[in-house]
Image (cartoon, coloured by chain):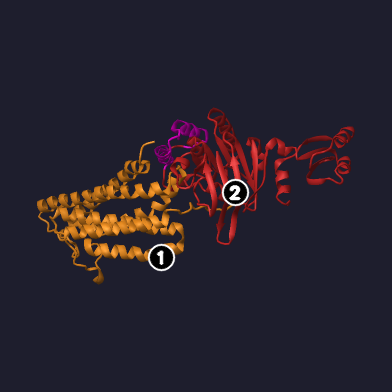
Amino acid sequence: MNRWPILRYLLSSHTVVLVGFLLAVYLLVAVIVAVAALFTEVTVSAVDITGQVLPWLAAGYGYSAAALLSTVLTHGRTRREFLVQHPVFQLVTVGLLAVLVTGAYAVEAVVYRAAGWTRTLQDQRVFEAGDHPMILLAYASMLAVWMMTGALVGGAFYRDEGGGLLALVPAAALLSVSGGANGFVSLPFTRWGLTSAPEIAVVTVVAVAAGWALLWAVLRDVPVRTRVAA
Amino acid sequence: MITTTDLCVRYGETTALDALDLDLTPGRIYGLLGRNGAGKTTLLATLAGFRKPSAGRVLLDGEPVFENPRATSRICLIREDGGLGDGIDRLGDILDMARALRKTHDQGYAAALLDRFGLSRRQTLGSLSRGQRSAFGIVVGLASRAPLTMFDEAHLGMDAPGRRIFADELLADYVAHPRTFLLSTHLIEEQSPLFEQVLILHRGRLLLREDVDDLRTRGVAVTGPAALVDDFVTGLTVLGERSLGPTKEVTVYGALAEPDREAARLHGLQLGPVAVQDLFIHLTGGV
């Protein structure tokens, strides 16, 4: 058996699907923008608007991790293996997705320039339209924290519903703290002023590590659910 | 093979398994019987490392099972609810996952089993009927070729031909690739021909463990004219009875002494093996 079988499996299947899904989303966005341009003047960045949906997609995907754990256990693997290999998969996948998003911003810049359209970003963004390193960092930060938080909440609800509700508190804290830094949660009490690249990176690492530690605590000995007890 | 020592599992105030000691030797087919709530599912889940014991130990060839990949990779438990994926997952993808995660998984055998059960790799889990889902669970379980393979009511919802295929394939693959099977079932009469040994769980404890052939000698089925049979079994412990016209079959508990057997022969009564299900019902408290 190969080492890290769960990671290899996830990278060869789930990562491919997620990247393909995001590509499909951007193709759809391109079509919508092209159609809209026939009727009105384009003034906002469609890729940037799409960025509002990505946190929820990341969290939703992360939420499914507990169900995946159950299947992995059926195939003879352990919780410990899963809790080590799934986060590595998350980070690799998030990195790829962030590169893809950054590429979408770059392609959009070329298209808008050629078409003579203006390109306005959301107010709370911590990056400028052409600042690709910061775009990469902000999206990587957001995707990493939201995916891990989704996994935490999904794992807690899998363990028991009361625990799931309880997990919403640290989940909200993780998203608020990190969102104030990467610009994807804009609330009055989350404006930390930590907007330099090193600051965003540190906040992200701390938030992801905290989420992973909580996920470990929730799932390290979780029983596999059975619908009918004997 | 797999051993439990003082195994306890509790759910709050409820004790599902109570100081259970068990030692299953390798290369046999075991039947796990028990009434609803006896602890069968909990026992199987604990043996597979799906659940941590509240107390006691579970060892596979001397190694702890829970969270030990050296042990869990050699165990496969297929439960009645499947637990193999989401409704949108294609069967082929689920089998690919099994191949990626389990060294002993045989993809060629899985494909052959899919054909036998009339399933396709392109079907999604959600599109399957209850019986087809069970059949797919059996595909995954048998193709795992895990040294300890357990099925928990895995045939639920399957029609009779499907269950026959399951029994045939299990026996054929058991002969070709000897390993240990533990089958939990309520279809006792149908499945008992598969078993070499029967384990009966009752209220979280092991009530009985016996080879099926020996178990059947714990009782006798007496068949003949109704009046003669009724006379013959007077004073014996009757487990069950069936009538067909003037003929009656009564199952009695306990071995018959030689004089009783001789008397039965003189009266033209037939003596036969007892149904395991009748013994099970009697041993677990009757109807």
For the residue pair B16 and A229, the one nearer the viewer reads as B16
Q: Is residue B97 found inside the magenta-colored segment of the image?
A: yes
Which x, y percent locates residue A19?
28, 46
Instruction: Give the secondary structure at mark 2.
Output: helix
The residue depicted at 45 percent of the width and 34 percent of the height is B104
- What's the magenta region? B90-119
Which x, y percent locates residue B15?
59, 57
| Residue with the most extreme top position | B176
Which quadrant: the N terminus of chain B?
top right
Vertical relation: A186 (above or below) A205? below
Magenta residues: mostly which secondary structure? helix
For the residue pair B144 and A84, the one nearer the viewer reads as A84
Q: Which residue is mark 2?
A: B40
Which x, y percent locates residue A80?
40, 49
Count of marks, rendered view: 2
Q: Which residue is mark 1?
A: A166
Residue A69 visible in the snapshot: yes
> Tags 1 and 2 in contact by the CB under 8 Å rule?
no
Which chain is mark 2 on?
B
Instruction: Give the secondary structure at mark 1.
Output: helix
Mark 1: amino acid: Leu
Question: Which image quarter: residue B191?
Answer: top right
Both marks 1 and 2 on one chain? no
